[in-house]
Amino acid sequence: MTVLAFLDYASVFVFALTGALVASRAQLDLIGFVFIASLTAVGGGTLRDIILNRDTVFWVAHPTYIGVASVAAVLVFFTAHLFESRYRAIVWLDACALAVAVPAGVAVALALGQPPSIVVIMGIITGCSGGLMRDVVCNEVPLVLKQGELYVTCALFGGGAASVALYFELPQPIALLICAGSAFALRAGSIAFGWHLPVYKGFAPRQ
Amino acid sequence: MTVLAFLDYASVFVFALTGALVASRAQLDLIGFVFIASLTAVGGGTLRDIILNRDTVFWVAHPTYIGVASVAAVLVFFTAHLFESRYRAIVWLDACALAVAVPAGVAVALALGQPPSIVVIMGIITGCSGGLMRDVVCNEVPLVLKQGELYVTCALFGGGAASVALYFELPQPIALLICAGSAFALRAGSIAFGWHLPVYKGFAPRQ
Amino acid sequence: MTVLAFLDYASVFVFALTGALVASRAQLDLIGFVFIASLTAVGGGTLRDIILNRDTVFWVAHPTYIGVASVAAVLVFFTAHLFESRYRAIVWLDACALAVAVPAGVAVALALGQPPSIVVIMGIITGCSGGLMRDVVCNEVPLVLKQGELYVTCALFGGGAASVALYFELPQPIALLICAGSAFALRAGSIAFGWHLPVYKGFAPRQ
């Protein structure tokens, strides 16, 4: 299995877990779990593949991805009650998924010979869109819009770190590892310690 | 006209009716009706065609589809007040549209030589995405997420029935008919008699 | 620079301003501004390019577009407090963006040799989708759904005007200018003077 396929499978599995947990909050049935889990799991990569005009969307070429997402959904359906706080579980699992999906997006863009700017943007799209679709469809406040939290910034940071690593001619697997590590570290710091950038403050919030 | 074109036209027309009825609930003007009706009508098939990377999206090849959706929108604009309960009308018309859109998705995937898993998934995407887009844009609770109702399950069941029928070498038009029939029967049973799968119940709904 | 590229750049810049202003209402940080600004700015054109199956999405071919959107986001981040009413600014800038994006969509469809109906529809998609994505993601009431306001109608009117102009064999740049002017005039009239079409009125709004 290539590094790329491994990253795609890992991010599909972990994003599917977060999707299924959101489905548990909406009290759906098992098929609803599988539907939301799959949407979350393959949404970002699908958008990446469509925008980059790849010949075949990754999960159409290998439907096993949907199988992996379904397994994750079933797993959560029968164990979600064991989580003390499902929201906390969603947030942390989502952080892990982000950390794997960003390098997955970066790797595909590199394989297609895209320039650094597109490489970074594909990391962001692959990392952030699946969770965004999950939240929009399930009517949750999108994690990407949470005030005083870093989210898109983490994807940008990961993609940027990978670009710098490649610029200094580190081997690609190392660059992808650095990408995952820095995205996760920043997101974890934001969740655990409240790291954030200054937010816009006008005179009134909804003027 | 091929079976495929007939299915696409029928699902476009009926989904457009549901979109226009939702537009009537949002009290839009005639162009708003046409817009939401078209989005609902061609949304699922467009997603299917883009994901399968067909050369031309079906309604770009034949803009008549948009004409059909527009006619449905105009029709509803002048007659929606005749419905005793517009919500009931939306739900039942949506069930009919689902029953035609699922085989439409299945047929396209078969024509492109996709494996059974992708065939079933394309049935689900074609059947469920248009209505999902309609509900997300109009800020209604998505039908696919209604608790204690079968929706995605009906699409899955229809797609599965078609696959089984094809496995036993029934001719494709028969298989598509079985697909439509089983999807509709299950959805109708869910609406009329409350058929449902067990839903996830944690300790608290939004823990 | 071709007329087409100019239209794309202008609509990207102005739509990005509206996206950043919506981000300011949601009190995001700078990267959040850039994210929402970029989504709004390139969303419509991306959808147009994907549906028309262009070889490369416009901003993947020229990542400068994302740079332009980012500049607009940064600009707004540091100046949004100067606007007396940010909502008014959003609505008027959005009207300008619409007036540039519709001819941008029309021009691409013409360049691909599409028939008049698809040309008009591509004008509508390019003009309306970016703002729609912005509003759905940020959970604002979509401008396209505002009661008693013309929005999709303006895009349709602009696209129709361009088609008529081309039918009478006016040169394309003139037709695109007429397209932009008529879309803007109608939208401005709707905002300033309340021009509207009769809306659907049933017996009860959410029956």
Image: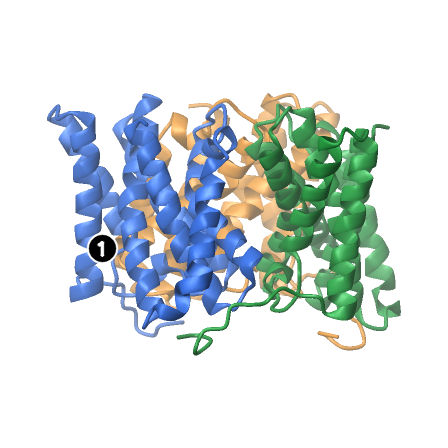
Chain colours: A blue, B green, C orange
Q: Is residue C178 visible?
A: no
Residue C172 vertical placement versus A41 (above, below): above
Q: Is residue C34 left or right of residue C178?
A: left
Residue A166 vertical placement versus C42 (above, below): above
Residue, far left: A168
Q: Which quarter shows the C terminus of chain B?
A: bottom left
* Along the viewing direction, whichever of A134 and A12 lies nearer the viewer: A12
- Residue indicated by mark 1: A187
Q: Is residue A123 left or right of residue C150?
A: left
Q: Residue at x 77, y 49 (%)?
A: B182
Q: Is residue B119 left or right of residue A33?
A: right
Residue C117 vertical placement versus A186 (above, below): above
- Which x, y percent locates residue B167? 71, 32
* Along the viewing direction, whichever of B58 and C74 lies nearer the viewer: B58
- Which x, y percent locates residue A100? 29, 43
* Along the viewing direction, whichever of C110 and A35 lies nearer the viewer: A35
Chain letter of disc 1 in the image = A
- Which x, y percent locates residue A106? 29, 33
Q: Is residue B5 visible?
A: yes
Q: Residue at x 49, y 37 (%)?
A: C46
Q: Is residue A30 left or right of residue B69?
A: left
Q: Residue at x 50, y 72 (%)?
A: B201
Q: Which quarter shows the N terminus of chain B?
A: top right
